[in-house]
Amino acid sequence: MSVQLVLISILLVVFLIATVMPVHMGALALVAAFIAGYFIYGTDGDPTYDDAVFGFFPGSLFIVLVGVTYLFAIAKNNGTVDWLVHAAVTASGGRLAAIPWAMFAVTGVLTAIGGVVPAVVAIIAPVGMSFARRYQINPVLMGLFIINGATAGGFSPLSIFGVITNTVVADNGLEGSPLFLWGASIVINILLSIAVFFLFGGRKLLGGGRVDLTDRRDDDFVAASVAGDATEDTGEDIPGGPARGVAIGSTGTAGAAVSGGRVTEARHGEPGHQHSHVEDRADQKALQTTALAVDNAPDPVTTLDRDRTLTLIGLVILVVGSLLPLGLDIGLMAITVGVILSVVAPRGAKGAVGQIAWPTVLLICGIVTYVGLMQDQDVPGWLGDNVAQLGLPLIAALLICYIGAVVSAFASTTGILGALIPLAVPFLQGDNAIGAIGLITALAMSSSIVDSSPFSTSGALVVANATEAERDRTFRNLTVWGFSMVALIPPITWLILIVPGWL
């Protein structure tokens, strides 16, 4: 068996184990890199082989991930995120039919400025689902709008999906278009949301009047100030948070909270304990988040103070700096803005380092390290030779889009993007090359839109924030929708973006 085939087999085992067992995919990938690098690849007589593993660690990508999530944590701490939620709801004018679109917009903005997609969903899902519950909006409609909005912003040059995709494209010397990728994500998620609106009861909202924004009950979004904090999956209270709380969207669950995308209900042996599909599946995800609504929540954030204004200015500078051709590193810019905010507005920076999306950083860096080893052993070239012998590059492109969709519906989208794009390189080179921008965009869309599956973290968070009476129905509907996306998005994006050869 060739070394290339062994390395591919190990990668498949990593995906399989991380999908069916509660093992972090990034940590598992680093173990795979250690085994392959020291005992399979690094057998050239050097007793250390350190470069066989550490030589592939993505240092610049690490800085980007840490920088943007650090800045996002500061924005969340000082109330800037809460203000954006309030501004989005206010901008809707309180019209009932516009509330889902307001949630779509605010999740898109938050992920576009660097928020990790599952963490942003954890922040906004309790807010949106509480609106849905109070005003009889279908929870599936609201949940899908939140997930689609997060995915729409997720491919901005500042966001995690966009960073990992654009970095892998640049490292492999491929033609890329970060703005086209982001624009395609926005367009397809808006179109999907329009379909969701009419499929899941949105038509009746068109004549549903307005929401009274002066009612304190409509300010549930204040819980976002403590929602989505990255915590260890121990079920403990958020550091510094109130001791008492109940999960938003949960009734009769004995103080259930959402942790790791699952509902933590009564313990074994206690009354009301049940096993949940959502709990069993979402417990295995790479990003731990906590969405908690507190009994003594602070007043809602409705105004801009000095710290929030400075944070918004910093975010604008970061966005402009990343879009202009100045050659400035996004990660270093984000850390710089974060440090400046820490100096001039230290209150919001307290605990921000602990809220960096460390599980996501470990996930991406672990996968990219292992994929770097695979590239060094010319696995893409080996795949390219075999694809060339088949003479079916278009079919191979469709297949890799389906692989991305199926695996991502159960596992990590970021991990899939980091692994499959380098393996798609053979289809983008040679005489019968497929357009790089088209394939990369199709693969990115196929791998991300299926996050609506309840077996993925974002989908599990939506189910977890549904009421107990709605939870099973929400789970079933998201399952049908999620796997419809698995079946439909790869061939649709393949037909539009790859087959015509215009990209």
Image: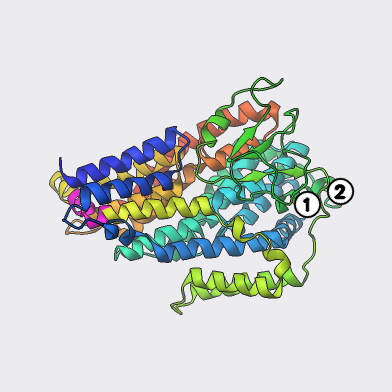
* Residue occupying image coordinates x 65% and y 63%: 74
Q: How is the image coloured?
A: rainbow
Q: Position of residue 223 (x, y in %)?
A: 74, 49
Quadrant for the N terminus, please: top left
* Residue occupying image coordinates x 49% and y 77%: 324
Position above or below: 171 against 477:
below
State the residue position of label 1.
94
Identify the element where label 2 is drawn: loop
Residue kind at label 2, given as amino acid type = Asp
Quadrant for the C terminus, please: bottom left
Q: Position of residue 424 (x, y in %)?
A: 29, 52
Q: Which residues are magenta?
A: 374-384
Position above or below: 365 against 295:
below
Q: Is 379 within the magenta?
A: yes
Asked if one can make out residue 392 in the rendered structure from this viewpoint, the answer is no
Q: Position of residue 4 (x, y in %)?
A: 20, 47
Residue kind at label 1, given as amino acid type = Gly
State the residue position of label 2.
215
Quarter where residue 243 is shown: top right
Give the class, few, some or many, for how many residues have Cα within 10 Å of label 2's Cα (few <14, many ≥20): few
Give the class, few, some or many, for how many residues have Cα within 10 Å of label 1's Cα (few <14, many ≥20): some
